[in-house]
Amino acid sequence: MKRSETTALTYDITLLFSVLFLVGIGIVMVYSASSALALKKFSSDYYFLKRQALFSLMGMVALVACGHIPLSVYRSLAYPLLAIALVLLLLVPFSNMGIAAGGAKRWLSIMGFSFQPSEIARLAMIVYLAFSMSKKQDNIKDFSIGFLPHLIVLSLFTGLILLQPDFGSAVSLGASTWILLFVGGVRLRYLLSSVLLILPMIYYVMLNADYRLRRITSFLDPWQYPTEDGYQIIHSLMAFGTGGIWGAGIGKGYQKLFYLPEPHTDFIFSVIGEELGLVGILIILSLYALILWRGVSIARHATDSFSVFLASGITATILLQVCVNMCVTLGLLPTKGLTLPFLSYGGTSLMVNMASIGILMNIGARHAAK
């Protein structure tokens, strides 16, 4: 083995601190946002707190484990991970293991454990793209080699995710793939052409789902639909407005009390804005900025194409989720069911994102050791 494959992991303190700080804030804010809801539904205000704390511990195990696995193993796992993710996505709509909630079937229950396959598919897609593009660097600008195979895999994955239906995750997966293909050197005209070709499909998908059309119209003017589809955005904006500069204080928010839907998941940023104010939001943004800085730095200093693409994909995917979630809560995008990394309640999202950070630190440590 090369020296870079056997050197013990050196933790990136800045990256690790940023992630753990966000996770810690997330545990506190999940409890604050969910206590009333948990008391009503489960007769215990600690229900979501306990689960989020457990998810965080499991995420730390995943981070450490993924940080110590040799990078050569990730190369060899590219296709197996892709196949596993594909099977899991197929099981959601086509087996009795799929779990429906809120009009969508997005979860699997296997041996008593429930998880969201689309989160696993996102990481599997990054590893696959990094491996595939690193092998095809000499022919990456060739349409049939550098673009078409990746487009076919992406279409298969997004098609299965849309069956759930989960439009937000499908768009997120497509966007992160587009970014990674751009970084990999795929011709820009292929990428732009794919966007133009997919627009009619997006239009068709939206027309065939009334609730998506209502989301668009309520996004354009939520105040015309204050008790319908504009309800979420209005109360989210009210939360930010109430928070002001310093916030109302942890636990003293009002919008989480059965006004904001899913205050501990999709709209936790709104609760943070109300209870921690502008100061809290700036701290959160600073921590995400540190993750972006370290991710870009690790990608720039990586010495092989696989590591460059893997680090770039992980960084882009996490920050894309951050941007989409924050824009939704601020009324800058139509509502999507995407969580805020490291902060929102959710085991699959938290553990996959922390595992991704472990891989990112792994890349930084291995190449720094050379």
Image: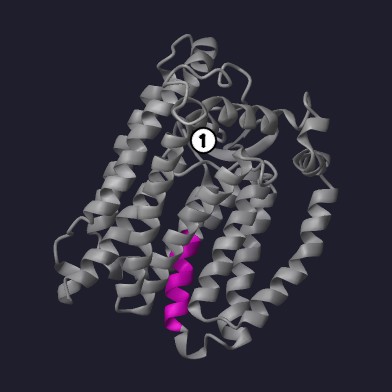
Q: Position of residue 341 (x, y in %)?
A: 45, 44
Q: Is residue 162 above or below residue 235?
A: below
Q: Position of residue 259 (x, y in %)?
A: 63, 20
Q: Is residue 232 visible?
A: yes
Which region of the structure is painted magenta? 124-135
**Quick check: is 343 in the magenta stretch?**
no
Task: Residue at the far bottom: name it.
Answer: 138
Q: Would residue 24 be found to the left or right of residue 102 on screen? A: left
Q: Would residue 117 be found to the left or right of residue 14 on screen? A: right
Could you tell me which quadrant the N terminus lies in?
bottom left
Q: Would residue 293 be found to the left or right of residue 153 on screen? A: left
Residue positioned 77% across, 63% down in the render? 199
Could you tell me which quadrant the C terminus lies in?
bottom left
Q: Quadrant of residue 255?
A: top right
Q: Nearer the viewer, residue 286 or 93?
A: 286
Q: Position of residue 141 (x, y in %)?
A: 56, 87
Q: Is residue 77 visible?
A: no
| Chief secondary structure of the magenta portion | helix
